[in-house]
Image (cartoon, helix red, strand yellow):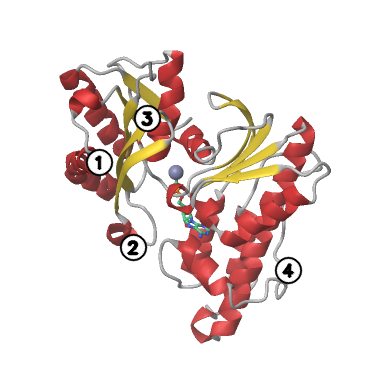
């Protein structure tokens, strides 16, 4: 007899994407709907929590209905409802958590709580049937930069994280300084293609020989000084810079961030004897980072395998939530209706 297919409805509202997806057996993506709020936040150059929350409230049920329709399923086909309840903006998370609890109650389905960062890591495993452990996972997003030791999809040990800005946040802030469009990561990547990554030697903060933590505020400040003068009293030179000068700054900044990310990941991999490197989170969409990590993995002795989240599942989505929830479903790890959103995690 064929084992029963487990269909999980995943819900994601931790930041500025309202997303829902139906995934079968943790791997087979039956639908993925994402309502992006980029246009709403663009003019502020960053995410405004109240605007994010209001937009989630408007979109959450239409997005869920569309995910169910696209998957061709109804409530009787769904085995569990999973929701990212931490970390993120509390007033954004609460919308997804409330919707998930409401549907779980009304449809009489089990509820599964998902850590958004662990879900980002899961998206790197989507395509892989045979995960070689131990693995080091680098999660680089707008809110977080973390290195984990991954012992199984459900057993993750934090090895290091940022002590100030997240990598994606640094991309967004530097794009703001350079007057590039929001969100900053894709803009910097685009313009950096025409720039010289060695034009300016921006600092690489390694935080000591053994540290697996990150710090990106120094690089961001160095870009600011480069554009406004050391004492910040100089004129903002960005307006009078040539396209080439801006491209050189973007490429040099990107190279500095990637250098640190790759070296720290290599450090962590050596420390735990990793056979595999996993890469996920919004910044994982960056091709230069993907290529640099691939090079690091290929040149290791022995070489390590790199598993990267497919590009559509790097930035926030609900496929990663439903996919990780499958492992919790199998392990019987369910939440109850006291589930609350949590900013940290
Ligand atoms: O994972 P994500 O969608 O949201 C959070 O959980 O934070 O990540 C969004 C971040 C933003 O900071 C965005 O600028 C960055 O990912 N990002 C990129 C690229 N695409 C998105 N950073 C660098 N290069 C990219 N191509
Ligand atoms: Zn995220």
Q: Are marks 4 and 2 in contact (CB under 8 Å)?
A: no
Nearest to the eye among marks 4 and 1: give it. Answer: 1
**Which residue carries the number 3 mark?**
85
Cα–Cα span, label 3 and label 1? 19 Å
In the rendering, at what x and y percent does residue 147 appear? 63, 38
**Which residue position holds label 1?**
67
Verify CB contact (< 8 Å) between mark 4 and mark 1. Answer: no
Residue nearest the observer in this picture, 14 or 4:
4
How far apart are the alpha carbons under marks 1 and 2? 26 Å
Judging from the image, what secondary structure is the residue with disc 3 in? strand
Q: Residue at x 32, y 51 (%)?
A: 48
Which element carries disc 4, helix, strand or loop? loop
Mark 3 surroundings within 10 Å by alpha-carbon count, few (fewer than 14), some (14 through 19), many (20 or more): many
Q: Is mark 2 within 8 Å of ligand 1?
A: no
State the residue position of label 2. Answer: 42
Measured in 3D between alpha carbons, the distance from the residue under mark 3 to the one under mark 2, in whole angstroms, is 25 Å
Residue wearing tag 4: 201
């Amino acid at each position: 007899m064929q084992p029963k297919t487990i269909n999980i409805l995943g819900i994601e509202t931790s930041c500025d994407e309202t997303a829902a997806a139906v995934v079968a057996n943790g791997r087979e993506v039956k639908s993925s709907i994402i309502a992006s709020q980029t246009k709403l936040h663009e003019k502020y150059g960053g995410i405004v929590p109240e605007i994010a929350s209001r937009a989630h409230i408007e979109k959450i049920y239409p997005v869920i209905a569309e995910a169910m329709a696209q998957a061709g399923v109804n409530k009787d086909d769904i085995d569990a409802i999973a929701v990212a309840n931490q970390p993120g903006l509390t007033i954004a998370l609460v919308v997804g958590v409330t919707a998930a609890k409401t549907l779980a109650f009304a449809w009489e389905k089990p509820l599964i709580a998902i850590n958004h960062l662990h879900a980002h890591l899961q998206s790197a495993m989507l395509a892989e049937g045979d995960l070689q452990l131990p693995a080091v996972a680098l999660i680089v997003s707008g809110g977080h930069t973390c290195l984990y030791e991954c012992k199984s999809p459900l057993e993750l040990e934090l090895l290091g994280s940022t002590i100030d800005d997240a990598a994606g946040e640094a991309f967004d802030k530097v794009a703001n300084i350079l007057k590039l469009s929001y969100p900053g990561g894709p803009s910097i990547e685009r313009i950096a293609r025409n720039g010289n990554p060695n034009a300016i030697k921006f600092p690489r903060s390694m935080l000591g020989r053994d540290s697996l933590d990150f710090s990106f505020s120094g690089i961001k400040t160095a870009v600011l000084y480069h554009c406004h003068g050391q004492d910040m009293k100089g004129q903002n030179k960005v307006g009078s810079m040539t396209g080439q000068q801006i491209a050189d700054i973007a490429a040099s900044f990107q190279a500095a961030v990637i250098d640190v990310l790759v070296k720290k990941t290599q450090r962590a991999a050596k420390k735990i004897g990793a056979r595999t490197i996993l890469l996920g989170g919004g910044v994982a969409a960056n091709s230069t980072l993907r290529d640099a990590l691939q090079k690091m993995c290929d040149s290791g002795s022995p070489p390590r395998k790199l598993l990267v989240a497919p590009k559509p599942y790097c930035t926030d989505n609900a496929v990663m939530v439903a996919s990780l929830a499958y492992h919790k479903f199998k392990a019987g790890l369910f939440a109850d209706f006291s589930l609350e959103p949590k900013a940290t995690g």
